[in-house]
Structures are given as C-alpha cells and as structure tokens.
Image (cartoon, helix red, strand yellow):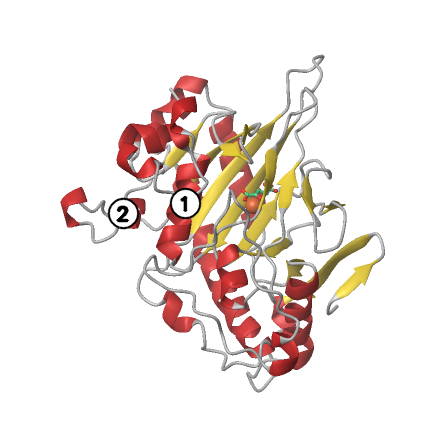
C-alpha cells in the first residue's frame, strides 16, 4: 500500500512500517511516495505508525470526558490566564481567517518553566511555559495527551528523516533543527454544532481556511466521529474531503517545510466544516516544529526537484518568517487575540498581518 489514490480520494495512503528495508535503509518506494504526496497534494494518510491497541479510544475518551465537564470546570484551565497560550479556549474564541471557529480546545506543548520576561533574548521565548491540565477533574488526560505527543514525536522524527532521503539529502539533514527543545505543540479539539433543532448560520466554520505554521502536522481524527469535516485544497484543485480512516493519521506540510523547500513541498490550505445541529467532532492535532531559534534556510534540492519549486506562497495577511519562533509567534498572536492583548500588548502590532487590536475588548 504505497502512495495509493483514487479519483475521488486524491489523498495518498502510506504505511510507516514499510518505510525501511530489512537492512535498516529507507525504501525508495516509500520515500518517493512520501515526497510526491507532499509535493502534489501536501496531504497524506499514514497507517502502521505504532499506535498501541486502545490508545486512540482512550485518548478520545479522556478528551470527551473533559469537554463534557460543566463550563466552569473547563474554564479553570482558561488560556487567557496563560501568557504562553496554554490551556483551554472556549467555543468561538479562536480566530481563523478573521472569523471565530466553532470549536473548543486545549493547547499544550513541551512542559518547560516560564522564562522571566527580563531574560528574553527574543519575544518568541514567551511561548515557553507550563501547560494547564484538568488534574482535579480528568487526571488521565495529561498522561494520555503526553503519551500521544511522545508517539507523535517519534513518528514525526522518522517521517522527517524519510522526507530528507526522498529529497535526495542525507537522512539526518534536518536533525539539527530539532535537537535540544523542539517546540512541538498539541491541540485536543472538540467541534460543536448549534443545539439540536437550530440551523447553522451560513458563515459558520469549524476552523476557517488556513495553513499550519509548523514543519509537519500529524492529525488524529476521531474514528468514531462524523465522516465529514476536514477538507483540503491541494494546488490546482477544489476543496476535497479528508475523512477519518480508522486509527490513521493525516499528515500535512507546514509553512516551515514550504519555506525550507522553496515551495516544492506545499503547506496546503485546509479547513473544517462546522458541525451540524446537535453534533460534535473530536480531533487531536500534533504540530511537529523545530527549536524556536531554528532558521529554515533553503535546502539544496536536486536540479529536477528545484525546477518544480515555485517559491513560497505569501499573502498580504500572511508572511512566512524563516526563523521558526517568529513564525510561531505570528500564528499565536493572530489566533488568540485575547491572550495577546491581555499579556503582550506591546507585541500585537509587530506581528505582520495578524491582529486588529481595535476589534478586541
Ligand atoms: O481538526 C481538524 O481536523 C483539523 C484542525 C486543524 O487544521 C488545525 O487545528 O490546524
Ligand atoms: Fe490546520
């Protein structure tokens, strides 16, 4: 099962347990299919990545138990109290493409002590700090989420090496970007439709069209959840559905990888449709990202691939910043204006195309 697609489903499927040959070297059939999928579509589905039996169901159950708590218990983790953008965002308080998203979530990352402001060399160091977990109410969520992040870090490391090999580079080419403290982050998400019996407003969005600003995204959609939701818009294509397939992951290219490959790999725009009345959908995103101080300099691509690299796609609203910490800060300030204005008012105006300070109370 290497790089299979059908006309109705352009998103290829790969198995990570077929990536290497018995002698430990990467199998070009895998690395070519990986590179090709992330070049043409920017998305793929991954099976065979070492998930333990029951791991997905237990993670989803813990997430569901949290989201079913009364609002005041969820708000005990309010991310507006975290200068590091960690914790719980209420329904409708994250902004994508300028509009509120019909989802709630817990954002988490590497568990590190906060750095005092006086010690910052760069503003992006505010992104380091403690997570906020519901240890009093759903204590199992912290462990399940961090176990998931550990597995995803291993999968992402292997995918990153396979991708380097597929690009004609030594497999450890990208390793230096991630040594030390790679600044991955995770997102435990629930999309919430309007109450049963009401209708969706025409402009409702689960999450609006966007590209991810990390290196690679590894997304888990609840296999028991609704089939419709995630959609991607590959180059030259209309929106296509990317439904869940069992315990598989959806892998997509982040802006940092588009920057490093001068657009040969594409950070494909995607969105999630709003849930219908009386329904919900859960997912867990894992955003594999370099150290905050890592610079994504262009990689030396073989001539045939370089000839297919159109450059990065920047817009007036979205600059792609080659130092990862700068790109990450841009994303957080834009998505969470309430946190930005409460804790970092001096930074809000410096993030290109991000936050309209006047519109937020
Ligand atoms: O929940 C999903 O299916 C996708 C979420 C997403 O694209 C994101 O959080 O960046
Ligand atoms: Fe995304």
Separation (CA) of disc 1 from disc 2: 11 Å
Q: Position of residue 348 (x, y in %)?
A: 34, 36
Q: Tag 2, which secondary structure? A: helix
Judged left or right of residue 7, residue 361 is left
In the picture provided, is 199 more to the left or to the right than 323? right
Give the residue displayed 27% in from the left and 36% down from the top: 346
Quadrant of the image for the N terminus?
bottom right
Quadrant field for ligand 1: top right
Residue 189 at x, y percent in the picture: 53, 36
Q: Residues within 10 Å of mark 1 (few under 14, many from 20)?
A: many
* Residue toward you, 66 or 125: 125
Q: Where 325 falls versus 197 (above or below)?
A: below
The reply to whether residue 140 is visible in this rendering is no
> Does residue 59 appear anywhere in the picture?
yes
Residue 312 left/right relative to 149: right
Label number found at residue 348: none
How many residues crowd mark 2 within 10 Å: few (<14), some (14–19), many (20+)? some
* Residue 210 image point, x, y percent: 58, 43
Instruction: Relative to 310, say whether 200 is above or below.
Output: above
> x%, y% of residue 204?
64, 25
Judged from the image, the secondary structure of the residue bearing numbered disc 1 is: helix
Residue at (28, 42) in percent of width and height? 130
Point out the residue furthest to the right here: 7
Name the residue furthest left: 118
Residue at screen point 21% across, 53% down: 121
Residue pushed farthest top? Answer: 197
The part of the image, by quadrant, that contains residue 141 is top left
Q: How many marks?
A: 2
Which residue is tagged 1?
330
Res. 248 image quadrant = bottom right
Q: Is mark 2 within 8 Å of ligand 1?
A: no
Q: Which mark is residue 123?
A: 2
């Amino acid at each position: 099962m290497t790089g299979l697609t059908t006309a109705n489903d352009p998103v290829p499927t790969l198995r990570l347990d077929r990536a290497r040959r018995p002698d430990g070297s990467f199998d070009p059939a895998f690395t070519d299919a990986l590179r090709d999928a992330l070049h043409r579509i920017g998305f793929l589905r991954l099976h065979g990545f070492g998930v333990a039996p029951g791991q997905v169901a237990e993670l989803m159950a813990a997430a569901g138990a949290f989201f079913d708590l009364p609002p005041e218990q969820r708000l005990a983790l309010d991310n507006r109290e975290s200068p590091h953008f960690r914790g719980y965002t209420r329904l409708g308080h994250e902004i994508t493409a300028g509009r509120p998203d019909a989802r709630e979530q817990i954002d988490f990352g590497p568990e590190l002590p906060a750095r005092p402001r006086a010690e910052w060399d760069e503003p992006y160091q505010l992104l380091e700090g403690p997570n906020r977990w519901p240890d009093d109410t759903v204590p199992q969520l912290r462990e399940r989420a961090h176990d998931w992040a550990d597995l995803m870090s291993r999968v992402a490391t292997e995918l990153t090496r396979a991708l380097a090999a597929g690009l004609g580079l030594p497999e450890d080419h990208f390793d230096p970007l991630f040594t030390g403290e790679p600044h991955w982050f995770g997102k435990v998400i629930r999309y919430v439709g309007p109450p049963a019996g009401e209708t969706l407003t025409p402009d409702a969005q689960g999450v609006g069209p966007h590209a991810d600003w990390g290196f690679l995204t590894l997304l888990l959609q609840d296999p028991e959840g609704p089939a419709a939701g995630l959609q991607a818009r590959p180059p030259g294509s209309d929106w296509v559905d990317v439904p869940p397939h069992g315990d598989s992951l959806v892998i997509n290219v982040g802006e940092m990888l588009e920057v490093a490959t001068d657009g040969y790999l594409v950070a494909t725009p995607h969105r999630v449709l709003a849930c219908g009345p009386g329904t919900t959908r859960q997912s867990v995103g894992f955003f594999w990202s370099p150290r905050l101080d890592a610079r994504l300099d262009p990689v030396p691509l073989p001539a045939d691939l370089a000839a297919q690299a159109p450059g990065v796609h920047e817009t007036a609203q979205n600059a792609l910043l080659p130092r990862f910490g700068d790109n990450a800060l841009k994303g957080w300030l834009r998505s969470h204006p309430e946190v930005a204005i409460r804790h970092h008012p001096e930074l809000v105006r410096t993030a290109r195309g991000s936050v309209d300070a006047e519109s937020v109370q």
